[in-house]
């Protein structure tokens, strides 16, 4: 999913769905999956930061 093709709630839902799917196929000690989970968490954190920034900006307007 391209960031420019979705709303923020859609992006959050997509990242959450990807993380859920990863949990379903997770095997103990899977280093590749662990790295993917860290990357997804980073993406989600960035989106949530953007949401908070937009909320604050909206309250100031």
Image (spheres, rainbow, N blue to C red):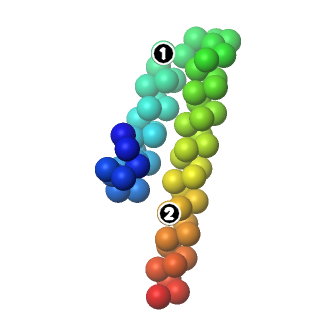
- Callout 2: helix, strand or loop? helix
Q: Residue at x 68, y 12 (%)?
A: 29
The number of numbered discs placed on residues in the rendered structure image is 2
Q: Residue at x 43, y 25 (%)?
A: 21
Give the image location of residue 42, x and y in percent: 61, 43
Q: Earlier in the sequence, mark 1 or mark 2?
A: 1
Q: Nearer the viewer, mark 1 or mark 2?
A: 2
Q: Is residue 14 left or right of residue 37?
A: left
Q: Residue at x 60, y 35 (%)?
A: 39
Residue that numbered label 1 is attached to: 25
Residue that numbered label 2 is attached to: 51
User: Could you tell me how far apart the alpha carbons at marks 1 and 2 are, in whole angstroms?
Assistant: 30 Å
Category of crowding for the residue at label 2, using alpha-carbon neighbours closer than 10 angstroms: few (below 14), some (14–19), many (at least 20):
some
Dot label at residue 8: none
Give the image location of residue 34, x and y in percent: 63, 23
Question: Is residue 52 positioned above or below 45 on the image?
Answer: below
Give the image location of residue 33, x and y in percent: 58, 20
Question: Is residue 47 positioned above or below 13 on the image?
Answer: below
């Amino acid at each position: 999913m391209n960031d420019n093709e979705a709303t923020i709630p859609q992006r959050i839902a997509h990242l959450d769905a990807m993380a859920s799917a990863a949990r379903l196929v997770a095997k103990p000690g899977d280093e590749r999956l662990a790295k993917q989970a860290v990357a997804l968490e980073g993406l989600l954190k960035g989106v949530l930061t953007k949401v908070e920034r937009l909320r604050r900006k909206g309250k100031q307007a």
